[in-house]
């Protein structure tokens, strides 16, 4: 994961997390923040454009999921600030940092959206689990715990999305 200037602690804080753990956690948080915002936007794209016989149920589910991801983004960004970091949720920052595959803006079929989102949620979950290990090894159990919380939300959403794909060829 590439570090940028915004990954380094910048703000004074009395938080006693060791300096190296802060730096590692801020970099990790900014990386998963970008991934989470990207997944939020992909889910919102699916919500706006879903078509087909599953329209209503998927439209509502996607709306719920982008709301959940948005809440998790806020938690991730606030944790970075608690550590003295500056989270970057700008369009440019997210575009430069995301590790999530680009979303096809032309998708319409509900199950095609489910397939595309399932792939992206799985990528996000993997990145979160890597972040859990990274921050834990650096000595920041609180950030590791937060990433575990976000991981559980993403895993549950992934399970629900995948349920729509079962039985599909």
Image: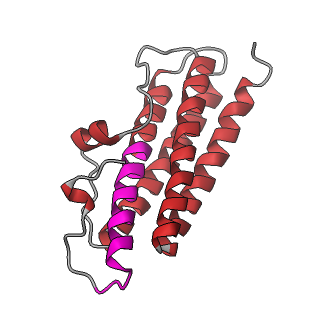
Quarter-of-image position of residue 99? top left
- Return the residue nearer the eye: 45 or 94: 94
Q: Quadrant of the C terminus?
A: top right
Which residue is at 58% across, 18% downward? 112
Q: Along the horizontal axis of the image, is 109 left or right of 77?
A: right
Please report the bounds of the magenta region as a residue range.
14-36
Picture coordinates of residue 101 (x, y %)?
44, 29
Report if residue 15 lies within the magenta region.
yes
Q: Is residue 35 left or right of residue 117?
A: left
Front residue of this view, candidates 112 and 123? 123
Q: How many marks?
A: 0
| Residue positioned most to the right | 167
Q: Quadrant of residue 61?
A: top right
Q: Image height check: is 1 above or below 95? A: below
Answer above or below: position of 89 versus 106. below
Colouring of the image: secondary structure
Q: Specify the quadrant of the image occupied by residue 41.
A: top left
Residue at image coords 37%, 64%? 24
Q: Is residue 19 highlighted in magenta?
A: yes
What is the x, y in percent for residue 135?
Answer: 47, 65
Q: Is residue 83 above or below residue 130?
A: below
The x, y position of residue 155, in whole percent, is 64, 47
Left or right, 91 with reference to 72:
left
Task: Kindly report the secondary structure that dominates the magenta region of the rendered protein.
Answer: helix
Is 93 or 74 nearer to us in this picture?
Answer: 93
In percent of the image, x 27 and y 59: which residue is there?
7
- Residue 105 left/right relative to 23: right
Residue at horizontal 57%, vertical 53%? 129
């Amino acid at each position: 994961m590439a570090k940028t200037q915004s990954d380094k602690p910048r703000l004074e804080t009395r938080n006693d997390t060791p300096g190296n753990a802060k730096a590692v956690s801020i970099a990790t948080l900014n990386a998963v923040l970008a991934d989470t915002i990207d997944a939020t936007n992909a889910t919102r794209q699916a919500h706006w454009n879903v078509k087909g016989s599953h329209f209503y149920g998927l439209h509502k589910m996607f709306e719920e999921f982008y709301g959940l991801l948005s809440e998790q983004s806020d938690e991730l960004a606030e944790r970075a600030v608690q550590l003295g970091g500056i989270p970057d949720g700008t369009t440019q920052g997210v575009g430069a940092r995301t590790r999530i595959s680009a979303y096809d803006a032309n998708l319409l079929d509900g199950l095609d959206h489910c397939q595309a989102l399932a792939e992206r949620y799985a990528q996000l979950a993997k990145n979160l689990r890597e972040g859990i290990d990274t921050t834990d090894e650096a000595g920041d159990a609180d950030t590791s715990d937060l990433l575990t919380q976000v991981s559980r939300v993403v895993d549950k959403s992934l399970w629900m999305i995948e349920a729509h794909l079962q039985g599909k060829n």
